[in-house]
Amino acid sequence: MRTGWYSACIYTGRGSVALLRERIHNNRCELDHTSRALLQVHLRLASLMSKSDWSLIDRLTFNKATRTGEDSKASQLQKFTRLHKIQQQNIRTPKETVINLSGRILDDGLHSLLQKGLNYAVTPRNVPIEDLLAGVEKAVQSLPVESAEEARQETVRIIKSASKPRDNLTRTERATLRNLKNNSELTILPADKGNATVILNTTDYKQKINTLLEDSAYRRLTKDPTESTERKTTKLLKQSTLSEEMWAFNTQTPVKYPQDNLSLLQHGESLKTRNI
């Protein structure tokens, strides 16, 4: 999906590749220049020294260069092996990143899907043109008229040249995701640490929510205070030293209602919860 950020990523990647190629080209040019200079020194020394002396020096320098190259190669291989071993020790196996507390047997397709994490961006089947246009229109509201129109035209150009995004899920994972959306008996949450994904029964999740809400720190509201809070906030902004454009921009931001979710902390076999 060739959106603005996607195109920027492509251009950035192409720029990095071009810089790498230029660096390789410069290094090869320097090596070629050095080889030519060494050849001139080699020929000059060969002409000034006797044949026996030159043969001895040439053999000693060649052996020295060979040993140096072998030592450097062995050092680099040892370093690579050590780093690779450390990385392998820090990598979790896929099933360790999925904590199953539902009591159900999870197949490999579900494990493969959940191990991607809750922040994994699934590519849509089609380019979400309406969402893109709505997002761009919201972003250009604070821009000058000419800049906003230029952004709109660029967005339309990118959308017209966009191709169908490549699916980043297998057929099995896509079917599993569809089944999870339709399964109201399971709830999937993030773990508190370790970037793990927790799957548990919805009844257990609701039970723990109710247990938390029984705390005296929470109370039921008699009415929705959003409109009253918006009016008070707008009044305070108008009375402040902010410019009219600044407080008008702040009041145009849609209100996001707070949500109370749970993060699961697993210590051994016990399960604890906390609000996030």
Image: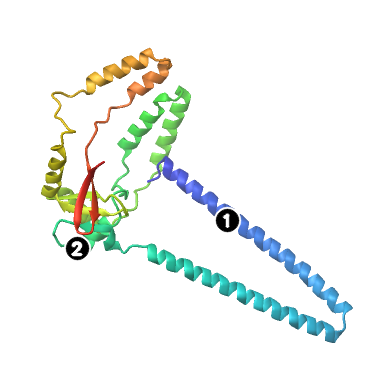
Q: Residue at x 45, y 22 (%)?
A: 145
Examine the rendered structure and indicate whether residue 11 appears above or below residue 75. Answer: above
Task: Tell me if 178 is positioned left or right of 1 in this view.
Answer: left
Residue 208 visible in the displayed image: yes
Mark 2 lies on a secondary structure that is: loop
Q: Earlier in the sequence, mark 1 or mark 2?
A: 1
User: Horizontal placement of 36 versus 254: left or right?
Assistant: right
Identity, as a three-letter code, of the amino acid under mark 2: Asp
The outermost residue toward the top is 239
Residue 149 lies in quadrant: top left
Q: Quadrant of the C terminus?
A: top left
Q: Is residue 184 visible?
A: no
In space, the residues marked 1 and 2 are separated at their CA atoms by 43 Å
Q: Residue 179: give x, y in percent of width and height.
A: 17, 53
Number of residues whose C-alpha sits closer than 10 Å to that of mark 1, classed few (under 14), some (14–19) or many (20 or more): few
In the displayed structure image, the side of residue 185 where residue 256 appears, left or right: right
Residue located beneath label 2 in the image: 107
The residue lying at 52 percent from left, 72 percent from top is 78
Quarter-of-image position of residue 50: bottom right
- Residue type (three-letter) at the residue carrying disc 1: Leu
Q: Residue at x 42, y 42 (%)?
A: 5
User: Residue furthest toward the bottom?
Assistant: 52
Residue 3 screen position, x and y as percent: 40, 42
Q: State the SS at label 1.
A: helix
Picture disc at residue 83 = none
